[in-house]
Image (tube, grey):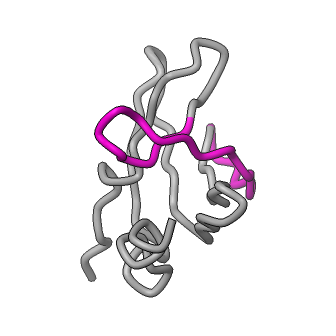
Amino acid sequence: MKNEEEKYELSKMYLREFQFFNGEYDITFNIVDIDTEKMTVKLAVSNLGKISVIEYDLQLDKNNNLFFEYGVDRNKIEVNDFKKIKD
């Protein structure tokens, strides 16, 4: 797991953002913390005007990319898809 820790350093991923459209409205995810030892990601989730901090279990796909599953449909959201917020 050492390579993943280097790859996903918190200093490089903190508050990166991802927008997800669930079929009705946009949901915004911001990374708060990534723990590759526990294989969890903590996210600030903005959904219908409310912000919640939620922790999800991380998984590795066949290409060794970290992802988590969101919602009832268990949509796969890859950590690599999160983008740096520009001022």
Which residue is depicted at the point 47% across and 73% down? 2
Give the image location of residue 5, x and y in percent.
Answer: 48, 73
For the magenta stretch, what is the residue range?
Answer: 48-68
Query: Could you tell me what secondary structure mostly forms the magenta stretch?
Result: strand
Q: Quadrant of residue 77?
A: top left
Q: Residue at x 51, y 61 (%)?
A: 30
Q: Quadrant of residue 82?
A: bottom left
Residue at 40% across, 78% down = 6
Give the image quarter of residue 69.
Answer: top right
Residue ID at (42%, 70%) = 8
In the image as oriented, which residue stretches furthest toward the bottom?
11
Residue 65 on the magenta span: yes
Nearer to the camera, 34 or 45: 34
Quadrant, the C terminus: bottom left
User: Is residue 16 shown in magenta?
Assistant: no
On the image, the x and y values in percent for residue 47 come to: 62, 41
87 horizontally vs 29: left or right? left
Q: Looking at the image, is 21 positioned above or below residue 41?
A: above
Residue 45 placed where, x, y %? 62, 50
> Is 75 located above or below residue 14 in the figure?
above
Image location (x, y in percent) of residue 37: 66, 66
Residue that extends furthest to the left in the rendered view of this protein: 86
Query: In the drawing, does residue 56 fall left or right of residue 87?
Result: right
